[in-house]
Image: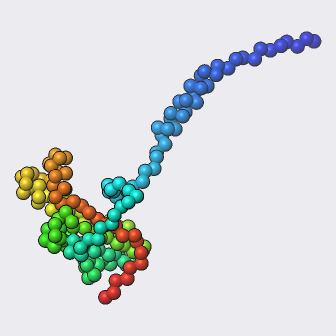
Amino acid sequence: MKTKKRMVPVVSAGSLADVAFLLLIFFLVATTIQTDTGLNVLLPAWTENDIVEKKQNRNVLSVLINSENELMIEGKRAQLSDLQTRTEQLILKEATSPKLALISLQNDNGTSYETYLAVYNEIKAGYNHIWEDESLRRFGQHYDDLDKKSQADVRKNYPLVISEVEPSTIAINQ
């Protein structure tokens, strides 16, 4: 008996490439990419020769948070609700100039993230209140309603300067 030679069908490689490409597109679109979340803070550019200026104590508000999430402002125990007022007081009254005011924030290694954010928000609230008052006084409008140039002009007179000291172990004595 003679065997017949069978022809092997030709597979179109072009359609296989199309299917692979479509699968690739599907997975790119369907996959979620994790993004880091945190505080949106613009830091100054780093240079080799950064000169550290010694600030006068009257221009600095020292804020400490220990591992028990207790707050200390200028070496005295304080409540979180006091921080916005103290921030405004430093900027508007105590500092030699609002442009020289600096908030020094230091937290303990054991400080909770929620407490850190609450403290940071209170400091920002102090600045936001000052910016709002200044924009109403100068432009007769709420700060959020101003154009970008006017907002930058207000922030130029009252710059947000927070110095974050590296976390360490902080003990707050009674």
Q: Going 6% across and 57% down the picture, which residue do you hit? A: 137
Q: Which residue is nearer to you in this view: 23 or 75?
A: 75
Q: Quadrant of the N terminus?
A: top right
Q: Going 70% across and 17% down the picture, which residue do you hit? A: 10
Q: Quadrant of residue 110?
A: bottom left
Q: Is residue 42 positioned above or below 62 on the image?
A: above
| Residue 87 rendering spot, x and y as whole percentages | 20, 69
| Residue 157 rendering spot, x and y as whole percentages | 16, 58
Q: Which residue is nearer to you in this view: 171 or 10?
A: 171
Q: Is residue 32 positioned above or below 51 on the image?
A: above
| Residue 21 rendering spot, x and y as whole percentages | 55, 29
| Residue 62 rendering spot, x and y as whole percentages | 28, 74
Q: Is residue 168 positioned above or below 121 on the image?
A: below
Q: Residue furthest right?
A: 1
Residue 111 appears anywhere in the view: no
Q: Which residue is nearer to you in this view: 29 or 146?
A: 146
Q: Quadrant of the C terminus?
A: bottom left
